[in-house]
């Protein structure tokens, strides 16, 4: 069967299992040809959602297989379909683990999507910045972009973002990170979320 025929929609399935199975098979067999076919099928509105699912699932398992298509994923960030947008951001986050230097260049574009896109897109952007920040060459840049996000992200996301990125700020830009959290702490009426921020501050000694 062709790659197209193995997608959930093509099989008349409403669940993602066929797509997950396909991603596993492609990853295990290092099937570069299949990746190219999926990229081409992203133009098919009926199958695009299936394709992006398979692609970012491949990225979770074997990011080097989707790395050559970084530009394709960046283009999808402008797509009106939210699933394609956040799926592309997820794929880019996977690529950042194997090609941080290429993803770093795209951060201004990713930030635009993070500010204007869906919650999942922003979540994946934060994860991408954390991956980049784990590399010494990109740490300070990633920290500054994270601080920008922390200043303006919705209250609901702030505790999680602070918890996930905290380790990056144990030395460089620690004071700026702490200042932003203190500034935003007064916005929180929900006790549980305040406590999460306060716990981060305690761990940082502030």
Image: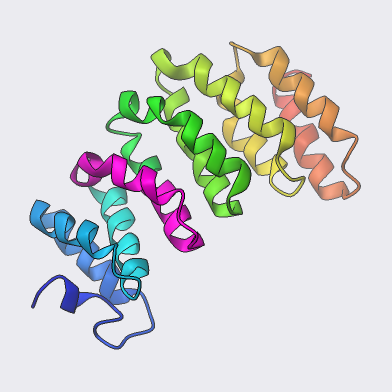
Asked whether residue 130 appears in the rendered view, the answer is no
Question: What residue do we see at 38% from left, 43% from top?
Answer: 74
Which of the two residues, 113 or 183, is positioned nearer the viewer here? 113
Q: How many marks?
A: 0
Q: Quadrant of the N terminus?
A: bottom left
The reply, left or right, for residue 84 in relation to residue 102 is: right
Across and down, in percent, residue 161 comes to 63, 38
Question: What residue do we see at 80% from left, 46% from top?
Answer: 193
Magenta-colored segment: predominant secondary structure: helix
Q: By what rule are the colours in the image chosen? A: rainbow
Please give the range of residues in magenta.
Answer: 63-91
Asked whether residue 134 appears in the rendered view, the answer is yes
Across and down, in percent, residue 22 comes to 21, 67
The reply, left or right, for residue 162 in relation to residue 139 is: right
Which of the two residues, 193 or 186, is positioned nearer the viewer here? 186
Residue 76: say if magenta.
yes
């Amino acid at each position: 069967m062709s790659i197209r025929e193995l997608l959930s929609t093509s099989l008349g399935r409403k669940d993602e299992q066929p797509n997950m199975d396909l991603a596993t098979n492609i990853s295990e067999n290092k099937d570069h040809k299949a990746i190219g076919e999926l990229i081409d099928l992203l133009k098919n509105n009926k199958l695009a959602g299936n394709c992006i699912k398979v692609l970012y699932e491949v990225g979770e398992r074997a990011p080097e297989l989707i790395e050559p298509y970084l530009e394709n994923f960046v283009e999808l960030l402008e797509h009106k379909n939210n699933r394609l947008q956040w799926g592309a951001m997820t794929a880019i986050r996977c690529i950042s683990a194997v090609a941080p230097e290429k993803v770093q260049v795209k951060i201004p574009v990713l930030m635009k999507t993070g500010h204007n896109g869906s919650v999942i897109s922003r979540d994946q952007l934060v994860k991408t910045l954390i991956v980049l920040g784990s590399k010494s060459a990109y740490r300070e840049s990633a920290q500054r972009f994270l601080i920008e996000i922390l200043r303006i992200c919705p209250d609901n996301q702030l505790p999680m973002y602070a918890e996930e990125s905290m380790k990056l700020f144990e030395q460089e830009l620690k004071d700026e990170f702490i200042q932003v959290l203190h500034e935003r702490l007064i916005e929180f009426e929900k006790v549980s979320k305040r406590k999460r921020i306060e716990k981060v501050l305690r761990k940082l000694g502030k």
